[in-house]
Image (cartoon, helix red, strand yellow):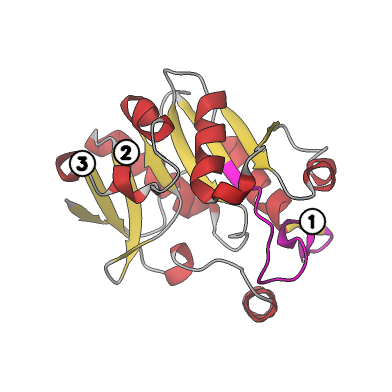
Amino acid sequence: MQWNYMCNCELRDLDGQVEGIVLAAGRSLRMGESKMLLPFDGKRTMVEVVARCVRPLVRRLIVVVGYRGDEVTSTLAGCSVEIVRNPDLDRGMTSSVQCGIAAMNAESAALICLGDQPFLPASVFALVLSAARRSGKGIVIPTFNGRRGHPLYLAPEYRSKVLKLANDQTLHTVTRGYIDDTLEVTVDEDSVLRDIDTPADYHRERRLITEGS
């Protein structure tokens, strides 16, 4: 199922029943240094920008850290977040999602966000939550030109399914496995598809931010 929204909805939540997860545990191998510690918005790091954007929309915000976790944690000292450490980050992003889901209240829905998308406007996060509320669907994913991006909404009933994913499975096993309960929300910008993996990505996004300011 697909709906077409413009990214200008009001900021709203789901009656306080949504918890956010920011994934910030990776080794940043293609960047050559911890991308979560790179400045993005003035003196703020990428992960801090994401955390401050998402925090007002959710009841509780969990940041999953791993590589250089103490340093990443210190950059979030001024944010109202809870830190969860991924002891097995070499298993990839799925293991970080599982760490975040396991730390949540079992009755809460999840808004899963990437720590390397500091350019996403708050309206995109609010859009996904609004679509989940209006549609009643358990999985809500933003799309641009037919391609799925982030952030991702998961209803509480998918908690156990995520936690049971094997080492060789990704979150796609869940997000592509329940078509009747999935809503794809078409957005009007490609930022939901982009992330920052390389120095070229980083410089591109900072340039775009500067040009747009």
Residue 53 appears in the figure: no
Q: Determine the secondary structure under disc 3.
A: loop
> How many residues crowd mark 3 within 10 Å: few (<14), some (14–19), many (20+)?
few
- Residue drawn 45% across the image and 62% down it: 192
Q: Amino acid at mark 2?
A: Ala
Q: CA distance from mark 3 to mark 2?
A: 15 Å
Q: Determine the secondary structure under disc 1.
A: strand
Residues rendered magenta in the picture: 22-43
Decide: is 73 above or below 141.
above
Q: CA distance from mark 3 to mark 1?
A: 38 Å
Identify residue for label 1: 44
User: Can you tell which quarter of the image residue 77 is in?
Assistant: top right
Identify residue for label 3: 178
Residue 112 lies in the magenta stretch: no
Q: Which of pointers 3 and 2 lies earlier in the amino acid sequence?
A: 2
> How many residues crowd mark 2 within 10 Å: few (<14), some (14–19), many (20+)?
many
> How many residues crowd mark 1 within 10 Å: few (<14), some (14–19), many (20+)?
some
Q: Amino acid at mark 1?
A: Arg
Identify residue for label 2: 132
Q: Which of pointers 2 and 1 lies earlier in the amino acid sequence?
A: 1
Q: CA distance from mark 2 to mark 1?
A: 30 Å
For the residues bearing labels 2 and 1, Cβ distance under 8 angstroms: no
Residue 187 appears in the figure: yes
- Residue drawn 17% across the image and 45% down it: 179
Task: Residue 167 in the image: state x and y as whole percent.
Answer: 45, 43
Q: Which of pointers 3 and 1 lies earlier in the amino acid sequence?
A: 1
